[in-house]
Image (cartoon, grey):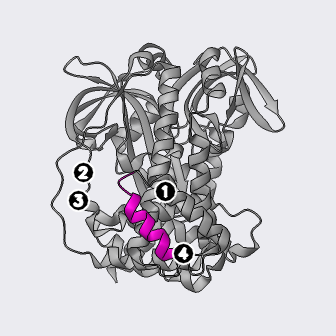
């Protein structure tokens, strides 16, 4: 990325973005206080939300929902309208920001292609239980959440985990409940994360609908070719971990290179952290080996949903060593990206791979910044995972960086996935996935061995309990 491209991003705020985010913030504030008794300020915020979407397909339902909620009658269908309106506004903000980024990078993007609609399914008790809990949370408000209400999430989580198709909903509810449990009483918090909790709540409301299966899914195609890894973004929560691999696919049919990603995950307990996280993902040895050894992969018949590959280790073969920096330098400028599915459109979901070189590193009041041709961009060193060798010190000493450009809190930033640096006059290269096959740093490996294998111990204990 060049300095002039950064200037385009910094100087041009998409029209209407601030207004859309202000409307979302108004609903988020109302959820803090709860919808049981809507005050004057919250009523005005809800009315403004309905007014902004009057001309949209949601207009009539949203206006009715706002009127009912303001009058003190809060039904599940009213919460669905509010959640849908919030997601629609953030989706529009996402599209404006992503369009601005594509223009700056000169990146081509294929439009979203819907697949055939699935037949409506029967009502699910697990979904109904989830809707009931989310309804109670919205009525009570974050400020009124207590341990009893948080504990009530256990039943819908357990019910959703029992249905494979509801695993995503289960993990979302479990994560939201865990965060609330850690923050109770929320009323004493100086700055509760209203945007984040409202994001989780709104997505949960949509996922918990019985009609969710009727929504047109993303078209699925099977792809084959050579997969060249750019880097891996590790998402870690107390109860779950996910490794999201960003890569470029060279199709076997000779088509243009495509930006893709694949994700593998596992449930966990909060005591499993650091390099031990990779052992939770050992059901995918080919992928982990490719990350650790920086190898290409030959894929055959992998399902592709938009930009997301559905990973099957048995359809993948390891290939030759491949330098992610060389891959980015040669293929990234011409790679075609895919548009996300409608319900995945959210500004926080923007994570576009970029290669940055020829910058100087600055420390601005504790914030690491790359200065590229006179244009600064903040670097999110706080997002570096604990399961890899990439550290803030290496980022500060780097001269080249492979990362994800993101938008959050009103600004663009860069999340490093790999860097090239000079340490003690020696060239060093570090990637977030370098320890996927085991720790390569002798000091860290010794400490890990001394601490013992927490994953193996927990699996052995779980197996013993199941055998009883």
Q: Is residue 218 left or right of residue 339?
A: left
Q: Is there a contact, CB below 8 Å, between mark 1 and mark 3? A: no
Q: Secondary structure at mark 4?
A: helix
How far is disc 4 from disc 2 in space, using C-alphas? Answer: 32 Å
Residue 441 visible, this angle? yes
- Count neighbours of disc 4 (C-alpha within 10 A) and say few if under 14, some if 14 to 19, many if 20 or more: many
Whichever of labels 4 and 3 marks the residue nearer the N terminus, that label is 4
* Residue 27 sits in quarter: bottom right
Q: Which residues are magenta?
A: 56-70
Q: On residue 372, which mark appears?
A: none
How far is disc 1 from disc 3 in space, using C-alphas? Answer: 20 Å
* Residue 307 sits in quarter: top left
Q: Which residue has dot 2 on it?
A: 216
Whichever of labels 4 and 2 marks the residue nearer the N terminus, that label is 4
Is residue 230 placed above or below 191 in the rendered structure? above
Q: Which residue has dot 1 on it?
A: 86
- Count neighbours of disc 2 (C-alpha within 10 A) and say few if under 14, some if 14 to 19, many if 20 or more: some
Whichever of labels 1 and 2 marks the residue nearer the N terminus, that label is 1
Q: On residue 70, which mark appears?
A: 4
Quadrant in which the C terminus is drawn: bottom left
Between 418 and 257, the one lying in front of the other is 257
Whichever of labels 4 and 1 marks the residue nearer the N terminus, that label is 4
């Amino acid at each position: 990325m060049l300095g002039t491209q950064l200037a385009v991003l910094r100087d041009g705020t998409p029209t209407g973005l601030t207004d859309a985010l202000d409307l979302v913030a108004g609903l988020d504030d109302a959820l803090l206080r709860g919808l049981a008794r809507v005050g004057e300020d919250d009523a005005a915020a809800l009315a403004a939300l309905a007014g902004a979407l009057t001309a949209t397909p949601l207009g009539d339902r949203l206006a009715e929902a706002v009127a009912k909620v303001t009058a003190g009658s809060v039904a599940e269908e009213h919460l669905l309208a509010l959640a849908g309106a919030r997601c629609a506004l953030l989706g529009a903000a996402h599209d404006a920001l992503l369009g601005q980024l594509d223009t700056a990078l000169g990146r081509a993007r294929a439009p979203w292609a819907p697949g055939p609609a699935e037949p409506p399914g029967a009502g699910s008790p697990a979904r109904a239980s989830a809707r009931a809990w989310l309804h109670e949370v919205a009525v009570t408000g974050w400020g009124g959440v207590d341990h009893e209400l948080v504990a009530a999430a256990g039943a819908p989580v357990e019910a959703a985990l029992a249905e494979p198709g509801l695993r995503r909903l289960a993990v979302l509810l479990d994560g939201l409940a865990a965060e609330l449990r850690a923050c109770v009483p929320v009323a004493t918090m100086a700055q509760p994360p209203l945007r984040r909790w409202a994001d989780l709540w709104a997505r949960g409301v949509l996922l918990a609908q019985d009609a969710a299966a009727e929504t047109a899914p993303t078209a699925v195609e099977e792809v084959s070719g050579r997969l060249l890894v750019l880097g891996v973004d590790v998402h870690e929560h107390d109860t779950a971990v996910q490794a999201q691999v960003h890569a470029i696919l060279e199709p076997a049919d000779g088509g243009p290179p495509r930006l893709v990603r694949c994700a593998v995950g596992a449930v966990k307990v909060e005591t499993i952290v650091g390099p031990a996280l990779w052992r939770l993902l050992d059901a995918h040895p080919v992928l982990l080996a490719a990350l650790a050894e920086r190898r290409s992969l030959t894929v055959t018949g992998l399902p592709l949903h938009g930009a997301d590959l559905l990973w099957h280790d048995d359809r993948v073969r390891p290939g030759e060593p491949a330098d992610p920096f060389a891959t980015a330098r040669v293929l990234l400028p011409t790679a075609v990206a895919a548009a996300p599915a409608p319900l995945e459109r959210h500004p926080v979901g923007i994570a576009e791979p970029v290669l940055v070189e020829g910058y100087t590193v600055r420390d601005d009041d504790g914030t690491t910044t790359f200065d590229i041709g006179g244009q600064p961009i903040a670097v999110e060193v706080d997002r570096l995972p604990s399961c890899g060798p990439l550290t803030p010190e290496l980022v500060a000493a780097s001269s080249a960086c492979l990362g994800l450009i993101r938008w959050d809190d009103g600004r663009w930033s860069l999340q490093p996935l790999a860097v090239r640096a000079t340490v003690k006059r020696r060239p060093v290269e570090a990637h977030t996935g370098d320890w996927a096959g085991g720790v390569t740093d002798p000091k860290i490996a010794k400490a890990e061995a001394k601490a013992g294998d927490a994953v193996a111990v927990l699996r052995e204990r779980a197996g013993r309990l199941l055998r009883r």
